Image (tube, rainbow, N blue to C red):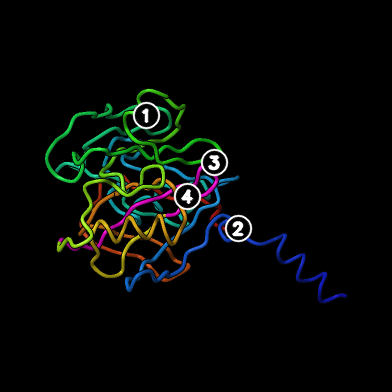
Amino acid sequence: MRGLAACLLALLLAPAAAQAQDCRDLTHAGNVYAICEIHMTGADLRLFLYDDTGDLLGHFSTVNAALAPTGKTLAFAMNAGMYHEDRAPVGHYLENGIEQMRVITTEGPGNFGLLPNGVFCIREGRADVIETLTYVEDQPACAYATQSGPMLVIDGELHPRFLIDSTSRYIRNGVGTNADGTRAVFAISRNAVTFHEFGSMFRDALNLPNALYFDGNISRLYAPSINRNDLGFRLGPMVGLVVDAD
């Protein structure tokens, strides 16, 4: 009984990061992915782009340095949306309720303009992937939002432009959410995959009705729990789970 009581106490005192996130490898249809599942109840999930002086953050380490004086740190982070050469967002970007880039609703070149695209919206206690035109119509009260594209899964269906026999393969990353917004799963492929394979993983392996592509080739992950701290050139928008440093 004493041992059982000790185990229960340890669970109650477990760090918030362990309760809020679960990072692991997932194999689906012959491809391997690193995924981090965030349970949104009580989770402090944020977007990061510039520091308080307006300078680009650009790296996971810079975000951690900015959080340190507040006694906080990142438990997980990932690049979260496409950006221009100066790292400014290509599409809609909202941070702490302040819009830094408007919503783009028109078709355009590249993956971002492969409609339908979508917006990843973070609110208190929930996170949602929302198709862009629905986002504009509904105007959800997001604290943070980042637009990217294309949508990978739309109401349980793969993007209509995805080809099962595509030869376009890259390391890709993105996010999917469940219907009530309590579960957000971030994924990055460990090997090069097609859009069809990546979307199918979110729909069929993770059972998520909506998923959004963040980027490919430059995709990076920070997840100390699985020994990931991908380095490289400066990033634009990043998403991260913030926890107490102790």
The image quadrant that residue 197 belongs to is bottom left
Q: What stretch is highlighted in magenta?
A: 168-185
Q: Mark 3 points at which residue?
A: 180
Determine the CA span between mark 3 and mark 1: 16 Å
Magenta span includes 195: no
Determine the CA span between mark 4 and mark 1: 19 Å
Determine the CA span between mark 3 and mark 4: 10 Å
Q: State the image coordinates of residue 5 (x, y, percent, origin top left).
A: 83, 69
Q: Name the residue under label 1.
A: 134
**In the drawing, what numbered circle is on residue 184?**
4
The image quadrant that residue 89 belongs to is top left
Determine the CA span between mark 2 and mark 3: 19 Å
Instruction: Please state which amino acid type lies under the numbered disc 4.
Output: Ala
Instruction: Please state which amino acid type lies under the numbered disc 1.
Output: Thr
Magenta span includes 177: yes
Q: Quadrant of the N terminus?
A: bottom right
Q: State the image coordinates of residue 87 (x, y, percent, origin top left).
A: 20, 43
Depth check, mark 3 against mark 4: the one in front is: 3
Depth check, mark 4 against mark 1: the one in front is: 1
Q: How crowded is mark 1: few (under 14 residues within 10 Å), some or many (20 or more)?
A: few
Query: Given contact means CB atoms under 8 Å apart, are the residues at marks 2 and 3 in contact?
Result: no
Q: Residue at x 28, y 41 (%)?
A: 148
Q: Quadrant of the C terminus?
A: bottom right
